[in-house]
Amino acid sequence: MSRLRGKVVLITGASSGIGEACARAFAAEGAGLVLAARREERLRQLSRELETEHGVNCHAAGLDVRDPDAVERFEAGLPSELRAIDILLNNAGLARGLCPVHEGETRDWEEMIDTNLKGLLYLTRRFLPGMIERGRGHIINIGSIAGRQVYPGGGVYCATKFAVRALTQALAVELVDTPIRVSVVDPGMVQTEFSVVRFRGDEEGASGVYRGLTPLTGDDVAEAVLFCATRPPNVNVAELMILPADQASVYHIHRDNN
Ligand code: NDP
Ligand code: 8X3
């Protein structure tokens, strides 16, 4: 029987890309789901689909992770059968722009820091105490290869992902005397809405990022997340980096120019 049957998984950023793929993967394993993102209609549609396809219990609600009061209201609005979160997947995140710090826009920096870092903290602060009380739980953070290496124009985005890695390690240290596990999954290039968001709707610029290579899909990353979530209780995958075969580092990428 699946190790996830009957577990409750909260996924932020479930309205597209990696988060949506994870929702599908966890539902297929029989987990109950709490789905959060700002585009509520997309979440509701996904939720209906997963309930019909897999017979799982699913709750979808609009949430902007940058707003701590909204996070509090979101928790208060959870149905009783989905209140005890077993796995918190802190996935919501984004990059804005690709320009050096001396040309950067403060609103872009704020959006990245508030979403990728402070949002992750607000969700963790709200749901971790319950895990500690119940003596079970797993926090899985989506970091990035950009949390291990920097690149020009990626300064603030990379800084947020370095911070995600640092926070994951800090949580692991703080929770070592509890059964709570903490993991970070660091993907390389994944073709999702990420680059379209980064370039504010410039589809051509976004697809140029992946030109000549085979990027990861959201499903590839979901498999890695599922691997972390399904280890036996004595095993914690502390860090997992997953890259396209065409990528060896942020600087070493094989592109087929034909
Ligand atoms: P997508 O743009 O496809 O998905 C991002 C998700 O985050 C969406 O569901 C979006 O939902 C949600 N989100 C963004 N801002 C907020 C917010 N303020 N409140 C709530 N939800 C929010 O990109 P990916 O799936 O690729 O990105 C998921 C994670 O993976 C991010 O943390 C990203 O940094 C990381 N990552 C991505 C890589 C890639 O190459 N694609 C590589 C490495 C890591 P909505 O807009 O509806 O709120
Ligand atoms: C996204 C991967 O290399 O575009 O986290 O920063 S990268």
Image (tube, helix red, strand yellow):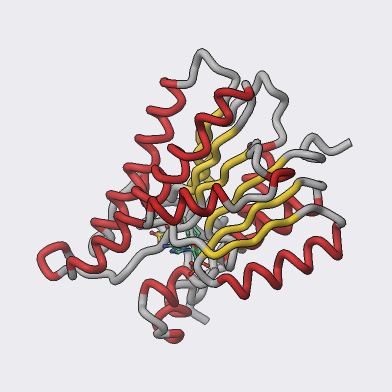
Residue at 46 percent across and 48 percent down: it is: 72
Residue at 54 percent across and 68 percent down: it is: 191
Q: Which residue lies furthest to the top in this view?
A: 177
Q: Position of residue 206 (x, y in %)?
A: 43, 78
Q: How many labels sit on residues?
A: 0
Task: Tell me: 79 left or right of 103.
Answer: right
Which quadrant: the N terminus? top right
Q: Is 45 drawn above or below residue 236 in the view shown? A: below
Q: Residue furthest right?
A: 1
Task: Tell me: 129 left or right of 117.
Answer: right
Q: Residue furthest left?
A: 102
Residue at 78 percent across and 62 percent down: it is: 50
The picture quadrant where one finds residue 133 is top right
Compare residues 34 and 201 and report the one nearer the observer: 34
Residue at 48 percent across and 57 percent down: it is: 92
Compare residues 86 and 183 and report the one nearer the observer: 86
Q: Position of residue 168 (x, y in %)?
A: 43, 34
Q: Is 175 drawn above or below residue 124 in the view shown? A: above
The picture quadrant where one finds residue 220 is bottom right
Q: Where is residue 83 in the image (x, y as percent from the top left)?
A: 65, 42
Q: Where is residue 62 in the image (x, y as percent from the top left)?
A: 54, 65
Q: Is 82 drawn above or below residue 139 in the view shown? A: below
The picture quadrant where one finds residue 232 is top right
